Amino acid sequence: MLSNFKRGVAAAVVGLATTLLTSNAMAAWDELNLPKGVTPISREVYDLHMLMLWICVIIGIVVFGAMFISMVLHRKAAGHKPAHFHHSTVAEIAWTIIPFAILVGFAIPATKTLLFMEDTSEADITIKVTGYQWLWKYEYVEDGVSFYSSLAQSSREGIYGDPWAVENYLLEVDNPVVLPVGKKVRLLLTADDVIHAWWVPALGQKKDAIPGFVNEIWTIIEEPGTYRGQCAELCGKDHGFMPIVVEAKSDDEYKQWVAAYKAEQKTQLAAAPVASQ
Amino acid sequence: MSSDITASDSHHAHDEHHDHGPPAGLSRWIFTTNHKDIGTLYLLFALLMLMVGGALAMGIRLELFEPGLQFVNPDFFNQLTTMHALIMVFGAIMPAFVGFANWQVPLMVGAPDMALPRMNNWSFWILPFAFTLLGSTFFMEGGAPAAGWTMYPPLVLQGAGNVPFMIFAIHLLGMSSIMGAINIIVTIVNMRAPGMTLLKMPLFVWTWFITAFLLVAAMPVFAGAVTMLLTDRFFDTTFFSAAGGGDPVLYQHVFWFFGHPEVYIMILPAFGIVSEIIPTFSRKPLFGYESMVYASASIAFLSFIVWAHHMFTVGMPLAAELFFMYSTMLIAVPTGVKVFNWVATMWRGSMTFETPMLFALGFVILFTIGGFSGLMLAITPADFQYHDTYFVVAHFHYVLVTGALFGILAGAYYWLPKWTGHMYDESLGKWHFWVSTISVNVLFFPQHFLGLAGMPRRIPDYAVQFADWNMVSSIGGFVFGLAQVLFCYIVWKTIRGGEQATDQVWEGAHGLEWTLSSPPPYHTFVEAPEVR
């Protein structure tokens, strides 16, 4: 019969293997890790994240490795007799100074990235985003476009039905935010009722939307495409049901969209003058 | 006052004639001022609350097993997450550590009891009353609080009848903690046996000494924060309303000024427990005792200047974001020092792996993993991607479950033979450890992936790309929950009987508590012991 210790190790290996080898673990690194994203900010943040992750993995291997070696070699059952040492000023100083130095090594690129993220000056377009319970409102300040954006009907039908049958379940809206690629977009965030938060992982930005206050973030989307995010601050019962969809188009397509939108708004106003008041 | 002194003198004289144990029946437990009884009450209460909080977690993981809503509606889901956290933090983890303090601090310093035994009784009996108040909100119109255990306004002020009940429960819990902390400080300062200098105290006593100061400093701030919620809700103040000249973010600053020391309150005693256990089962003294004391004190001091790392996305000025990033990273240094000292204690020891040691070693490894995710969270620009996602949920469950809870379980196995006089069933204990350790990692490790992949926290339903890891996590949760039912059985079985424990119990155990019989007499160290 295996000793208790060996049985324990076997159990741990089996458990770990089972966790890691489920079909999805080996499927896509994407499902395990932060996305690189499509903006200069998101790429810098990804690099910071990977730096932290690798250093932590290395430190983990060293520390846990030492522990496992000790657990195998320094066992009473293996006949090992205990040593008596119980202090070393040199060791204490070394394992204070070296981690401190590693932290300084992290702090420098992190500071650079934070300074980069905080500079919202010289934006090309500005959009005011307002969080409501439980939807978003977008107002394009320069272009005069304004609309509400809430969870798509297809998703609503899936909640108590079959989510797997819905495309982009819980990440689809009726009116997405259309943005031009390659332009600096400044987003002003506020809320009407409680605190919400606007977050699109592919853009690398998240900020709280606080009633009575205005927060600012900026982004430059480098690749056209559709990017999906969610509200990221508990805001009541439908906190999980107020997603964000950003459609990034070329600058020309964006201008066409603005023109078409304004034309449609004009037609609607002309058709129902009484209703507009 | 002199009449009190006379009364206790004659009471002791009375004792020498009758060697009476505790009175029989329920009134023993209601009126006890004995630190051992009060410790037992805290520990059993905490175990009950662990199961209640755990049941709520099972509800959460059941709903999150698959996408779509199958079992609960979104508002009730928010009640589950809110109450799960409040019950675990204030009903399970904190009272468990106070239970350990009550049993162990007087024994470890050679004192006959706590400094203020009657206040000690009241500190405990507030708890069942407070949790009845809090739990009753599930049954009232509008349901239990559902704005998260952090209770941010304006959302929390949209709550119905549960708001005042929750706030009053918190006031009561704060009073209990503050009174308990005062008792611990006074006992340690005034009642150590002659010869037990501060730097000869066991590390568990040191970590509780430091924790008690954190409690006294932080709990009143929490009381202030929730009182401002109460007045904003009922008495027309506008502390947290922009329309009235206030700011919702003010609440977050006040709350987290309490909240961050609170998490160190929940981990420092575990550090102390592990620092007792590893030397015993390595048959080697704790490495770097003084360093460990200074590291614990540094952690406590630093814990007051990091709070806004919980709020990196509120829109603070750049200087504040940088300051809190640096201070938060800094706290990793003394924490790392402690981990290295534990490893150095093991190194070239002569180890055996009974259940307390298994949980203590599991603590060191898994708490360190929680520390790594914490370090990642400290980096402000990266935190913008992690904040309010399952990456944070994974981090704090690693430090609180495989950290604080494993520390509690380690201490329970370590000291149960001393408290009850019976050895627990070692084979069952090992089963509990291995099933818990494997399942807790299946439960929480995938949550790192979910957070990085973009899943926010506090949502009852999710996009289908998150389905696989949620299912894995839920399975881990169900198994972990069952394993804790096994622990309840082990505790019950040990109380009822088992192999008679010796005084020393463990071959490598050193300290005043191991000089007493197992179980110790109802009153111990009536005469102060000699400490060399």
Image (cartoon, coloured by chain):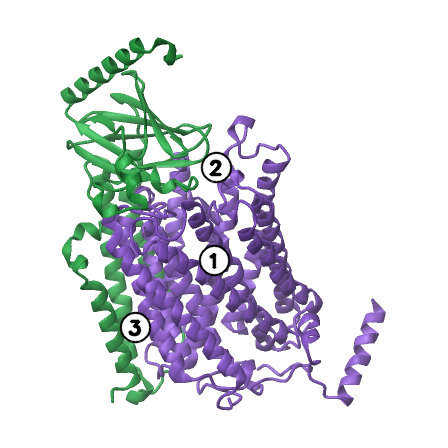
Chain colours: A green, B purple
Dots 1 and 3: beta carbons under 8 Å?
no
Q: Residue at x 36, y 70 (%)?
A: B436
For residue B15, side relative to residue B390 (left or right): right
Q: Residue at x 45, y 72 (%)?
A: B409
Q: Check disc 1 and give the amino acid type.
A: Tyr
Seen from the viewer's position, the closer of residues B493 and A277 is: A277
Chain to which mark 1 belongs: B
Q: Position of residue A15 (x, y in %)?
A: 25, 70
The answer for which chain carries disc 3 is A
Query: Which residue carries the number 3 mark?
Result: A67
Q: CA distance from mark 1 to mark 2?
A: 23 Å
Q: Which residue is mark 1?
A: B264
Q: Position of residue A52 (x, y in %)?
A: 26, 52
Q: Mark number for residue B338?
A: none
In which quadrant of the rendered view does residue B475 lie?
bottom left
How far apart are the two marked residues, 3 and 2, measured between alpha carbons? 43 Å
In terms of depth relative to the viewer, which is nearer, A35 or B13?
A35
Chain hosting mark 2: B
Residue A116 placement: quadrant: top left
SS for dot 3: helix
